[in-house]
Image (spheres, helix red, strand yellow):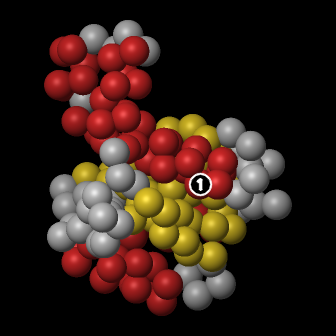
């Protein structure tokens, strides 16, 4: 059984989360500048036995793809070309940024850190996407 990586794709920054090898626990991995994401994945995925990548699918309230899907779709297409043997899934990411922000507040993350560490919300969002994906499989 291999790891699962979740991607919260953004125009500037991308949050990443990963499971343990047994795919039981989702944890924050990193936040990378989006323009370096593919290079990061080319190194990380093969070195860590990743079998599935879950990409957050931005949707509107009615379930249709949101405007940001227009820049996420080309990334997913490129990911499929770069890693043809990798399982790639899209997973609904509605409300993950709000949930991440709320989780940080409830977790006691100080306001100065929430403002200063821009990537923190992205990592937490990716973790929420991954946790939701894991729960949806059972």
Determine the residue positioned at 82% across, 60% down.
1
Whether 27 is drawn above or below 21: the answer is above
Which residue is nearer to you in this view: 112 or 135?
A: 135
Whether 76 is drawn above or below 19: the answer is below
Which element carries disc 1, helix, strand or loop?
Answer: helix
Which residue is nearer to you in this view: 133 or 4?
A: 133
Give x and y (percent) for residue 118: 22, 36
Looking at the image, residue 47 sits to the left or right of residue 17; the answer is right
Using the rendered view, name the quadrant where residue 101 is placed. top left
Looking at the image, residue 69 sits to the left or right of residue 86; the answer is left
Give x and y (percent) for residue 49: 71, 62
Whether 125 is drawn above or below 99: the answer is below
Determine the residue positioned at 34% across, 25% down.
102
How many dots with numbers?
1
Give x and y (percent) for residue 135: 66, 48
Residue 10 visible to an observer of this rendering: yes
Determine the residue positioned at 21% across, 14% down.
111
Name the residue that disc number 1 marks.
133
């Amino acid at each position: 059984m291999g790891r699962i990586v979740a991607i919260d794709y953004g125009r500037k920054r991308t949050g990443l989360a990963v499971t343990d090898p047994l795919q039981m626990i989702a944890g924050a991995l990193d936040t990378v500048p989006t323009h370096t994401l593919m290079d990061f994945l080319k190194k990380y995925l093969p070195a860590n036995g990743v079998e599935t990548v879950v990409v957050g699918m931005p949707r509107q309230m009615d379930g249709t793809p949101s405007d940001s899907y227009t820049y996420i779709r080309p990334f997913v297409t490129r990911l499929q070309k770069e890693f043809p043997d990798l399982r790639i899934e899209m997973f609904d990411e509605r409300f993950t940024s709000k949930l991440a922000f709320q989780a940080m507040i409830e977790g006691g993350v100080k306001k100065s850190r929430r403002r200063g560490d821009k990537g923190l919300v992205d990592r937490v969002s990716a973790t929420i996407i991954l946790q939701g994906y894991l729960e949806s499989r059972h």
